[in-house]
Amino acid sequence: MQYNELSVEILDKVGGANNVVSLVHCATRLRFKLRDRSKAQTAALKNTAGIIMVVESGGQYQVVIGNDVSQVYQLIMPLLEATGGAETADAPQAKEGLFARFIDTISGIFTPFISLLIAGGILKGLLSLALAMGWLTTHSGTYQILFATSDAMFYFLPIFLGYTACKKFKGNPFIGMAIGGALTHPMMVAAFSASQLASAQPLHFLGLPVIMINYSSSVIPIVFACWLSSRLEGLIHLRLPAAVRNFITPLICLAVVVPVTFLLIGPVATWLSQMLASGYELLYSINSTLAGMFVGALWQVCVIFGIHWGMVPVMINNFSVSGQDTLLPLLIPAVFGQVGATLGIFLRSNNAQVKGSSASALAAGVCGITEPAVYGLTLPNRRAFIFGCVGGALGAGVLGYFHTTAYSFGFASIFTLTQLIPVSGFDFSVVAAVIGMVVSLSVACALTCLFGRVNAVQSDMVTENRPLASEVTSGKPAQQEEFIGSPMNGKLMPLAQINDPIFAGGLLGRGVVITPTGGRVVAPIDGHVASLFQTHHAIGLLSPQGAELLIHVGIDTVKLDGQYFTPHVSEGDEVVRGQLLLEFDAEAIRAAGYSLDTPVLITNSDDFTDVIISDVCDTEENTLLLTLVR
């Protein structure tokens, strides 16, 4: 897929670069903080090819892209930096609640490097597996090099957090890195080790005793230190002479904040870290089974709204304080509950389009990415999503009962199973994790197969002949049905067979593909033009009954930048069935190397119980193409 055009389109539809305060991304979504959310064109974004869903939650405007989110992010950021649109401190912003600010702060600090932490956690898990199987020993050079690789980012976590936290607090991120470096400096680590000896002499700073703490892998101390540094920087930077401020500002920040961190912030923040870990362990110990069921049932609900980031510091803090965590394992059944529900849809559906999108979502879900399954399949099905949560609750209850524990950080996926292996080797809690995963998947799959509303996400091909559009419009259509004509002459093809995973997966809606034999697009309904792409290759229509149509001429034809396309309507125009909307030079487009396979989609197909495709091989302008059943 071409991401340059998508990046420009996203930035334009969130209100432009000047409407963006900040932007970060996680595994699947762009997380915007906007000055004025009313400027964002949410409906248009949801109908844009390449975008799975748009969610507003936690003080953020979240655009769900999928696995390729980092590529889109890397193209958008230069556009923001060129205009100065992001990270502007004095921009007027709408007031947000405390929880929204918390989620925004946490995601802004952790998302830039969370994938590296996950990669390190997986590598640690694989090393644990290698030790348990006898493939490596802790004394081998191979193990030591790979362990250092897996542990480096977690060990030096304060340095990475120093960069992202200062950047989030609008301070100099390199000052934050220097503070994190001081906390993890070998001299200070050695001083901590020496302080553990009975004969150790206390360390002092200007006569004040220093409480020695090992800050490697710590989270909360560096975040508070960066907050203080950023505030101090803001107070002194503009008050210093321009000739010296660039080096005097960091000098003052480091000279003040680092000692204050060792003397005050570090001990207090470490105490808070230990209280947080102890508080979680206390709640977990009251009834670990119920705790597991609660997390397994609600985790995916939190993911939908992007508020699951609030639990990331808890997990990382547990690893920092205790070297292990019981929260992460509970997420495995929550993920595989949705995988099981998706498998149920795959098994029950007899529609090629639904099977294709289900298979793709299954592969992503097993690897821990559930957004394609949730947004594209289980959530529209509603019952399937609930059954996935039920399966997640039951499976997580099993893990909670056996106190299954993780020994390295990550996000739940099939790879997380290796992160549950203790250094001493396999124990039954690892087996319990496998049992819980199988329970969640099996229960969700069985319930979806038996009781899921699969027709909420499928558009089955029918074998009965339907009336021509001209016949339908001569009389009043049957109640609860809406008839869509064909926008062009051509041959029909199932949506699942198109050479584009976004369209084929049904993520933009149900419909059909027409391979045109002419060069015209006519209105298939009475209605108005809801959108007309600047490159004129795609047009969106809205019917009086509320059906939202997208006619996308060709695959990747956006790259032609409007060449060979001639529009005959404008956005907002009222149109009647059969009216000429667009002309295109089919021969020239094919000669340029582009496919003219044209998806005709109902982008709000979730509003209909069925989308029935006319049972013909060839279609002509204004003959019946789709029947929408409410």
Image: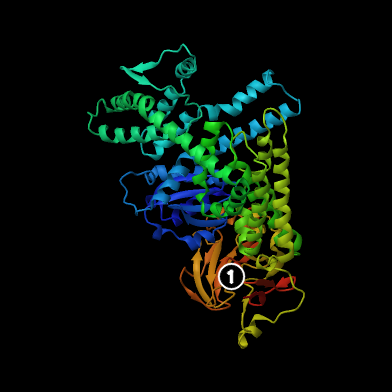
Q: Amino acid at mark 1?
A: Asp
Q: In the rendered view, does 46 fall on the left or right side of 419?
A: left
The answer to whether 17 is drawn above or below residue 193 in the figure is below
Front in this rendered view, residue 526 or 360? 360
Q: Position of residue 621 (x, y in %)?
A: 64, 75
Query: Within 10 Å of the Cα at label 1, are there few (<14), some (14-19), or many (20+) other Cα atoms?
Result: some
Front in this rendered view, residue 305 or 540? 305
Q: In the rendered view, does 134 fall on the left or right side of 475?
A: right
The answer to whether 91 is drawn above or below residue 587 in the figure is above
Q: Position of residue 282 (x, y in %)?
A: 53, 41
Q: How many marks?
A: 1
Q: Residue at x 30, y 46 (%)?
A: 90
Front in this rendered view, residue 7 or 261? 261
Residue lying furthest bottom: 475
Which quarter of the figure has residue 212? Answer: top left
Q: Callout 1: helix, strand or loop?
A: helix
Q: Residue at x 50, y 50 (%)?
A: 307
* Placement of the C terminus among the 4 image quadrants: bottom right
Residue lying furthest front: 286
Residue hosting label 1: 607
Q: Residue at x 37, y 33 (%)?
A: 172
The answer to whether residue 587 is visible is no
